[in-house]
Image (cartoon, rainbow, N blue to C red):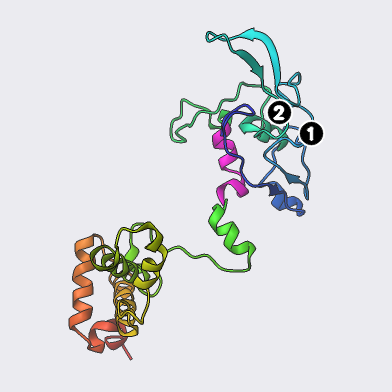
Amino acid sequence: MNVGYGGGQKVPRESTIPDDAERAKLYLGSHNPQLKPGDTQYFYFREDDPPPFNAPQAPKKDEETTKRNRKGECIIKEGYVGKAKGLAQIAWERGLYRTDAKMHGNKIDPDDESTDPTLSLRYVLANCWDFAHEKTALVALVESRGHICRFCVKGHPELAGAGIEYSWGKAKQKFRRDVNDRIPAHLHKNIVACFSRAAAFLPLARVRKFARKTRAYRRAYRDGQPNSLADVEKLVKAYKSHRAADVFDKKFCHADD
């Protein structure tokens, strides 16, 4: 987000201040907050909202001015209704904006003793509970429909689902080598065929094999605590070649009675 309002900045989802006074302290500051426990803060200006605190003369809607730019085009004075509030307005509404010093939107290094982190709007807002624990749009969408969204380790597709990445890779291989006839009208039908059991591309036995492979990787990560990709492959190979309880449950086998 930018410091000021408007522009092309994205608008985060609204946030509700907890009713509990103690929890609300994780959201609000001590510099005359405009919000109180139980209020919902929207990160864009609505029709009935007053103008930005740092631009009280800003118009509600975009207005043309008498000034022109170098191209001879009329300069537009941006209105605030429907526009993103920006870092300064959000912090001011929460009572986190200091009036005794000039705040900025730069990122700071908390370990740098020469800078005051409380003057950085990004630092101050990042320490609010809702900003620090903000859910992604995907997670919010899934949970809004009553489901649970879980992510596996980033960059490790071998851990995803019940071998779904292997199934996807096999389907793509078949599509590129055998099925794709390069006719746009056949695209959907060809893609569906690659995932069909009737076409023998992904029979149940193969899907189960992929799921077993995924479980092997999960065991390697969980029990072996690898430090590199080479360690992972070594562990997976060991689990594949050794089926003794001494390998799979070494701690249990060698535990003292």
Three-letter code, disc 2:
Tyr
Vertical relation: 119 (above or below) 201: above
Residue 98 picture location, percent across and down = 66, 27
Residue 219 picture location, percent across and down = 32, 75
**Secondary element type, mark 1:** loop
Q: Nearer the viewer, mark 1 or mark 2?
A: 2
Q: Which quadrant holds residue 244?
A: bottom left
Vertical relation: 206 (above or below) 161: below
Can you tell which mark lies on residue 9?
none
Residue 256 picture location, percent across and down = 31, 87
Please give the count of numbered marks on the rendered protein.
Answer: 2
Residue 255 picture location, percent across and down = 30, 86
Q: Residues within 10 Å of mark 2 (few under 14, many from 20)?
A: many
Q: Which residue is tagged 2?
A: 80
Residue 198 at least partly seen: yes
Q: Is residue 14 left or right of residue 232?
A: right
The residue located at (42%, 64%) in the rendering is: 188
- The reply to whether the magenta stretch includes residue 253 is no
Confirm or deny contact between disc 1 and disc 2 (CB under 8 A).
Answer: yes
Residue lying furthest bottom: 257
Three-letter code, disc 1:
Asp
Tag 2 or tag 1, which sits nearer the N-term? 1
Magenta segment main secondary structure: helix
- The reply to whether the magenta stretch includes residue 130 is yes
Q: Which residue is tagged 1?
A: 49
Q: CA distance from mark 1 to mark 2?
A: 9 Å
Judging depth in this view, the residue of 158 and 70 nearest the camera is: 70
* Residue segment shown in magenta: 121-133
**In the picture, which quadrant includes the C terminus?**
bottom left
Q: Residues within 10 Å of mark 1 (few under 14, many from 20)?
A: few
Judging depth in this view, the residue of 180 and 114 nearest the camera is: 180
Residue 30 at least partly seen: no
